Amino acid sequence: MWSTYIDVALLSSPVLAFLTVQHPKMHSKPSNLQYFLFTFVSLLLLRYAASTYFGTSEQILLGTCTTVDQPNPIASLYPNNATGTLNGTVAVIPISLKLARQLIPPQYGILEHAYRALLPNFPRGMYPAIVQALHDHEVQAFGYKIDDFTRTGIEFPFVDLLNDNHTSFKWAPSLIMSAGHEIALKGAADYGTNVFPASFEPGCDAYRAVPKAKKPRTTSFSALSLDSAASLTTLFSSTEEEHFPLSFFKNFTNQPTFADGKTCDNMIRLFNTSLTTAPNGIERVKGTVRANIHPFGGEQEWRGVYGLRMDTAFIENNYLNCEDFRGYDGLE
Ligand SMILES: *[C@@H]1O[C@H](CO)[C@@H](O)[C@H](O)[C@H]1NC(C)=O
Ligand SMILES: *[C@@H]1O[C@H](CO)[C@@H](O)[C@H](O)[C@H]1NC(C)=O
Ligand SMILES: *[C@@H]1O[C@H](CO)[C@@H](O)[C@H](O)[C@H]1NC(C)=O
Ligand SMILES: *[C@@H]1O[C@H](CO)[C@@H](O)[C@H](O)[C@H]1NC(C)=O
Ligand SMILES: *[C@@H]1O[C@H](CO)[C@@H](O)[C@H](O)[C@H]1NC(C)=O
């Protein structure tokens, strides 16, 4: 839109100059021609900058912007499965069990004994909700690769979908996702997920370093829905504290995931590829999450949230019968 205005200005600029040069009064000022040349060149530069800038955001929507993410290391191992990589941050947001009970649909139990078995010291009366802020990279199957995209949301693990008091499922009711990526948006909506097309900062990477931050290795991520109030921002710094064991993250990230409960998504995140086993492949982080996303009412802020910043490869099996996961404990 701006570039159009500038184009109009550029087109009329020679006309203005002509009028200026022809005008008797102005003719007497030799600097007018210089001024005209200066504005013409300025507009030309701005036009160039605008097309570069706006071209970039169009490229983000089209998914052609470049990422620094490492390639998918398992595509050739599982050529007939959907595989990809997930780079980003996953963190635990402790909320009261009472609030969890209000947010999670009443027909599903919460497997408190399951998360307590993994986290014996987790505070009484609390429940571990999860935030994930991830960049999906080189997602492919049968040699077809889709464009990268970004997504974020708050998820609820250890949900007793089958009412067997044993199998943990993860309820992921809402996702804020890259606008314009019709395949990913539809893929999530088909689970009954509330999908919020959004713009992200950074546009095509998992997070961005915050220059001159006081805390070590501070990074930011933000998502803003284009057509609703949904948003989510994070600020994380590295920490030495091992607040939750890695086994806990492995456990809940690999729980079958559902939204409306009609079908289940089996996302298998692998912690044993070169992406994750590299030195500093998994970084412990602590920070702040601010979110305005269903099923929470209004904006929330959680400080002192602990998580992991990492890149993992994944295999994804979509739209499965949830009942088939009865007794499923995840891979190890
Ligand atoms: C994950 O993303 C961050 C931020 O863009 C990048 O610095 C890092 O190299 C990525 N990790 C891998 C293994 O690609
Ligand atoms: C790959 O896909 C096949 C067919 O959908 C499925 O049976 C198999 O379990 C998948 N492999 C993995 C490792 O998930
Ligand atoms: C995940 O945790 C549950 C509950 O403690 C346990 O039954 C299950 O075996 C764990 N799965 C893995 C892969 O560790
Ligand atoms: C569910 O299983 C746990 C652990 O085995 C047990 O302590 C609890 O009483 C069970 N709950 C119900 C409702 O059966
Ligand atoms: C990595 O883990 C997966 C799932 O646990 C397993 O199937 C695979 O064999 C492992 N790969 C390597 C190289 O250990």
Image (spheres, rainbow, N blue to C red):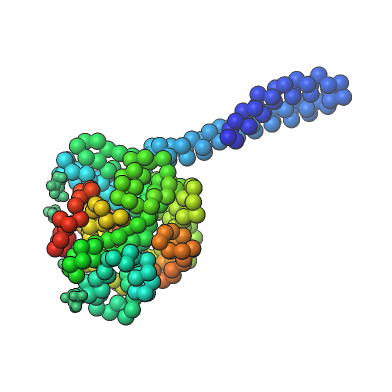
Residue drawn at the location 74% of the way across and 30% of the way down: 35
Image coordinates for residue 201, horizontal then vertical, percent: 45, 50
Q: Is residue 63 left or right of residue 252?
A: right
Image coordinates for residue 162, horizontal then vertical, percent: 20, 63
Nearest the eye: 173 or 279: 173
Residue drawn at the location 33% of the way across and 51% of the way down: 192
Task: Tell me, yes or no, if residue 69 can be seen here.
Answer: no
Nearest the eye: 108 or 268: 108
Q: Is residue 212 above or below residue 86?
A: below
Q: Is residue 154 left or right of residue 299?
A: left
Q: Residue furthest right?
A: 25
Number of callouts: 0
Image coordinates for residue 304, horizontal then vertical, percent: 41, 71
Residue drawn at the location 78% of the way across and 27% of the way down: 32
Quadrant containing the C terminus is: bottom left
Nearest the eye: 146 or 89: 146
Task: Tell me, yes or no, if residue 3 can be seen here.
Answer: yes
Residue drawn at the location 27% of the way across and 38% of the way down: 145
Quadrant containing the N terminus is: top right
Q: Is residue 314 above or below residue 245?
A: above
Q: Quadrant of residue 222?
A: bottom left
Q: Is residue 25 above or below residue 151?
A: above
Q: Is residue 45 left or right of residue 91?
A: right
Image coordinates for residue 204, horizontal then vertical, percent: 40, 45
